[in-house]
Amino acid sequence: MINHILEILAQWVIAVEQATGLFGVGLLMAIESACVPLPSEVIMPFAGYLAGKGAFTIWEAGLAGAIGCVVGSWVAYLVGMYGGRPLAEKYGKFILLNPHDLAIADRLFVKYGDAITFFSRLLPVIRTFIAFPAGVARMNLTKFTIYTFLGSLPWCVGLAWFGQILGENWTSLHEQFHQIDLVIAGLLLAGGVFWIRHHVLFLRAQKN
């Protein structure tokens, strides 16, 4: 079922890029960075394949992708800033999220926000969703924008370059990255289970 959905998304991505070129590359990466899980492992390698056919250059594809990442990340950041924080403060207790957790997130983004934003843009799965918590933590928007762009550019150029090198076999790159996605998703799930268990035990200890 999941593979079927991914195949449909991949075909749609290809159709958009074929029809709109660089604009489509930027648009699709913007959607992906707005917390919509479109596979950048399809978007950018296919852009690289098109670059190999002379439609545009690798650097043009990478720049379009990185700009799209910034635009989409602004959307997720603003949703987190103006919607996520009030909801987290009001309803966070229902998902075991307390003011102490929010304070920790704030301190982390104040102290390490530049590194968190930069390196998260280089990681599958995580890169799609990092803008929202950055907005919730109210990370400085200018710094967020700069490090989002700097982290996104090598990711986009690298995937496009591999797509160009692989040529007609560019889809094999998507298959390899899909395996990495599953591993990272599994680690995130395990981390989520640990976090929930820790908070449940903490609440029980407080009641006692």
Image: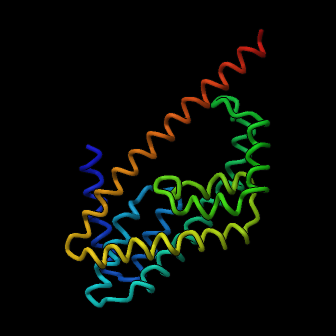
Q: Is residue 187 left or right of residue 3?
A: right
In the image, residue 59 sits, relative to residue 168, either above or below, namely below
Q: Quadrant of the N terminus?
A: top left
Residue drawn at the location 46% of the way across and 56% of the way down: 124
**Quadrant hosting residue 53:** bottom left
Q: Is residue 42 left or right of residue 167?
A: right
Residue drawn at the location 69% of the way across and 57% of the way down: 135
Q: Quadrant of the C terminus?
A: top right
Can you name the residue that lies furthest to the left here? Answer: 168
Residue drawn at the location 52% of the way across and 53% of the way down: 126
Display coloring: rainbow
Please provide percent x and percent y for residue 205: 74, 14
Q: How many marks?
A: 0
Please provide percent x and percent y for residue 20: 35, 81
Residue drawn at the location 57% of the way across and 58% of the way down: 120
Q: Nearer the viewer, residue 112 or 35?
A: 112
Please provide percent x and percent y for residue 2: 29, 45
In the image, residue 5 sits, relative to residue 1, either above or below, namely below
In the image, residue 112 sits, relative to residue 58, either above or below, namely above
Q: Nearer the viewer, residue 178 or 72?
A: 178
Q: Is residue 61 left or right of residue 8?
A: right
